[in-house]
Amino acid sequence: MARPDTSEVRKLTDADITEKIVGIRRELFDLRFQQATRQLAKTHRFKEARIELAQLLTVQKERIRSKSSSSS
C-alpha cells in the first residue's frame, strides 16, 4: 500500500480525515497486539501507518488553525 500524497490528503473532507485517523490508530493497535503475540508478518506496516497518521494529523491541525485564525 503506497503512502498517500499530501495533496491527496488535503482533498479529503474533515469527516473523511477523522475517519481515517481513527482507522489508522486502530490498525496500529492491532499491529502492536500482533507483534506482542508473535503473529506479525508485515513489520514495515508500522512505519507506513505512522507516516500516514502524521500526514492526516498535520492536515487536520492546519485546518483547525486556519479556521480559528480566520474567525479571530
Image: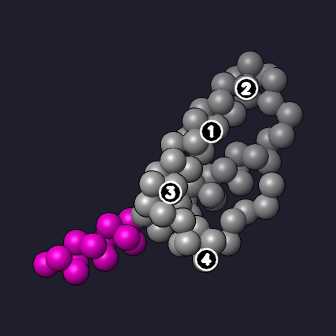
Between discs 4 and 3, the one toward the N terminus: 4
For the C terminus, the quadrant is bottom left
The residue wearing badge 2 is: 34
Label placed on residue 28: 1
C-alpha gap between disc 2 and disc 1: 10 Å
Q: How far apart are the two marked residues, 4 and 1, measured between alpha carbons?
A: 23 Å
Q: Magenta span covers which residues?
A: 61-72
Quadrant for the N terminus in the image: bottom right
2 vs 3, front mark: 3
User: Pointer 2 and pointer 4: residues touching (CB < 8 Å)?
Assistant: no
Ranked by sequence position, the earlier of labels 1 and 3 is 3
Tag 2: amino acid = Gln
**Secondary structure beneath disc 4?**
helix
The residue positioned 22% from the left and 72% from the top of the image is: 68
Q: Is residue 57 visible?
A: no
Residue 8 screen position, x and y as percent: 63, 71
Crowd around label 1: few <14 · some 14–19 · many ≥20 (10 Å): some
* Lower sequence index among marks 4 and 1: 4
Q: Nearer the viewer, mark 4 or mark 1?
A: 4
Residue 7 is labelled as 4
Q: The disc labelled 1 sits on which kind of residue? A: Leu
Q: Which mark is residue 17?
A: 3
Q: Which amino acid, mark 4?
A: Ser
C-alpha separation, residue under disc 1 versus residue under disc 3 = 16 Å
In the rendered image, the vertical position of residue 2 relative to residue 35, given as above or below: below
- In the picture, measured across the screen, residue 68 lies left or right of residue 23, that is left
